[in-house]
Amino acid sequence: MVFRVAHIGTGNVGRLALTGLLTNPAYELTTLCVSTESKVGKDAGELAGLDLSTGVTAVADLDAVIAAKPDCAVYCAMGDTRGPEAIADVVRLLAAGINVVGSAPVSLQFPWKLMPGKYIAGIEEAAQAGNASLFITGVDPGFANDLIPFALAGTCQSIEQVRCMEIADYATYDGVTVMFDVMGFGKPLDETPILFQPGVLSIAWGTSIRQLAAGLGIEIDDITEVCEKEPAPEAFDIAAGHVAKGTVAALRFEIRGMVKGEPVIVIEHVTRLRGDLRPDWAQPAQPGGSYRVEIVGEPSYAVDICPTSRKGDHNHAAIVAAAGRIVNAIPDVVAAAPGIRTTLDMPLVTGKGLYGLG
């Protein structure tokens, strides 16, 4: 069966998800929707960075996506800075009978106990009306905070703590909005970027905390957050732009799911723009960056995940993984019962049909 798929968003994740769609014969691209005016009218192959012409040119109107009546829409539009708009887009697609899988809006990865019930009910009503399902993976890179820890936890006799870590050098990450506006790199240490506004960390990663808690049968009492910043010892440039001396050049933050005053489920990020900054913070298992899942229990685990790519560095590889999970989930999203689906609902995606596509 060939699935007719629309694609929305061609940023860092979206471009690589689009590549996955165009290079897999299981999918037929119906429409491509973008938000950048300069991309409108360009062929999907060009925007994916591929040497091919698809005959599908980019539009800026979600109505065109809906009019094409695809089986599924891959939604990779920016959600960090336009959460309400992203949710509205998803609701429109679901109500029109179009299944949705994507990286955003992250709040819909596991919205219960995060979003007000009336908003969740509105999304569910749209899904039921359109007989469509929704699966949002998040990008972290979309598997390190659920698939891996759940697989390991399923072998334990007892569990005391689960910790999921991203330890990475972001100097090669070229997302200007994410790097400077959202994360606050290159900003004065006393300036508060979007990510560190009160409660934002708990919203952004609270979905992962609550999903892990639900899967492990843990009742979380509270979610807390802590962060540290490190200034640049001198000025230097990164892919996204310039970092002045004394501005933020490294971050470490934790989001903690608390039970009786103890951190039981922890998401930790150590993000540097240079490898020599804060050597006392956790170090990656490979040059540049890695992911780590730690379980304290019986047995205990410390598992390092080291993504690599023949087409880029560790940051590129992690985004390929996030995009791959989205694209490979399409058949199961189309087959799923209508409504908001999560990792706890979806079957295990095994990579069926991927051999020989590289």
Image (tube, rainbow, N blue to C red):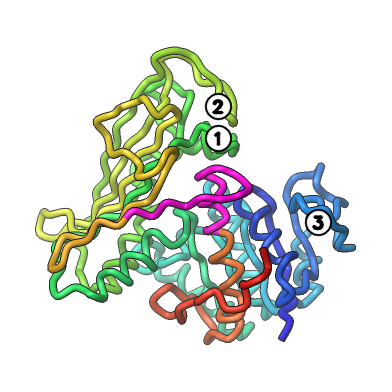
Which quarter of the figure has residue 112? Answer: bottom left
Residue 192, percent across and down?
40, 30
**Nearer-N-terminus badge (1/3):** 3
Pointer 1 residue: 172
Q: What stretch is highlighted in magenta?
A: 304-322
User: SS for tag 3?
Assistant: helix
Task: Tell me the quarter of the image containing the C terminus.
Answer: bottom right
Task: Tell me the quarter of the image containing the N terminus.
Answer: bottom right
Residue 160, percent across and down?
13, 63
Q: Is residue 281 shown above or below 110?
A: above
Q: Does the magenta stretch include residue 316?
A: yes
Q: Do the residues labelled 2 and 1 touch (CB within 8 Å)?
A: yes
Q: Which amino acid does label 3 sit on?
A: Gly
Pointer 2 residue: 238
Residue 104 shows in this picture? no
Binning the other alpha carbons within 10 Å of mark 1 as few (below 14), some (14 to 19) or many (20 upward) gives: some
Residue 170 versus residue 178: which sits nearer the camera? Answer: 170
Q: Which mark is residue 45?
A: 3
Residue 226 vs residue 244: left or right?
left
Q: How many labels does the image show?
A: 3
Q: Which amino acid does label 1 sit on?
A: Thr
